């Protein structure tokens, strides 16, 4: 099975400070190390890349930050999104700081 790429794009609410944005970004990046699968007792996120938008194209539609993680299987991605308590707690904690969230997942090379 091919790996699943999980992309999360964020726009923070205007009142969120630069310090708060940095703190949220660090916590999201930390999910790679903090999320452990209960059946294996091991970390299951293959990678996490993140950063602030710096595109010159002007098509961001107010999205400011991107987080790209990779999972070995759709089952691992599904567990992360639907069941992982560490992930769910972080989502709950930062939800009020976000104006917009966009998520796209894909398997490389699958177009149909």
Image: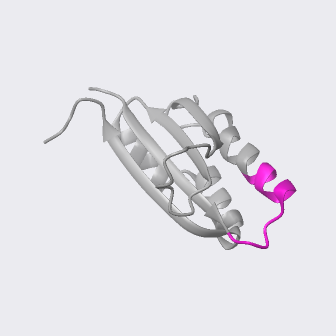
Residue at (51%, 37%) from the top-left corner? 69
**Closer to the camera in the image, 53 or 105:** 53
Residue range of the region highlighted in magenta in the rendering: 13-24
- At horizontal 26% and vertical 26% (from top left) the residue drawn is 1
35 vs 70, left or right, is right
The reply, left or right, for residue 37 in relation to residue 105 is: right
* Residue 101 in the image: above or below residue 48: below
Q: Nearer the viewer, residue 100 or 29?
A: 100
Location of residue 18 in the rendering, given as x and y in whole percent from the top left corner: 83, 56
* Left or right: 44 as drawn, with respect to 16: left
At 50% from the left and 63% from the top, the residue drawn is 61
The foreground one among 84 and 6 is 6
Colour pattern of the rendering: one colour
- Residue 62: x and y, percent? 57, 63
**Which residue sits furthest right?**
19
Q: Is residue 82 magenta?
A: no
Residue nearer the viewer, 37 or 27: 27
Please report the residue visible at 52 percent of the width from the left and 39 percent of the height from the top: 68
Quadrant in which the C terminus appears = top left
Q: Position of residue 15 (x, y in %)?
A: 79, 73
Can residue 31 be seen in the rendering of this structure? no
Residue 82 falls in which quadrant of the image?
A: bottom left
- 91 to 49, vertically: above or below: below
Q: Is residue 75 visible?
A: yes
């Amino acid at each position: 099975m091919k790996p699943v790429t999980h992309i999360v794009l964020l726009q923070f609410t205007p009142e969120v400070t630069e310090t708060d944005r940095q703190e949220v970004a660090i916590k999201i990046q930390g999910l790679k190390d903090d999320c452990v699968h209960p059946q294996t007792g091991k970390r299951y996120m293959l990678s996490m890349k993140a950063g602030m938008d710096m595109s010159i194209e002007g098509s961001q539609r107010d999205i400011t930050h991107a987080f790209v993680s990779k999972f070995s299987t759709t089952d691992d991605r599904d567990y992360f999104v639907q069941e992982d308590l560490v992930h769910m707690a972080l989502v709950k904690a930062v939800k009020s700081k976000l104006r917009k969230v966009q998520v796209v997942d894909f398997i490389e090379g699958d177009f149909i």
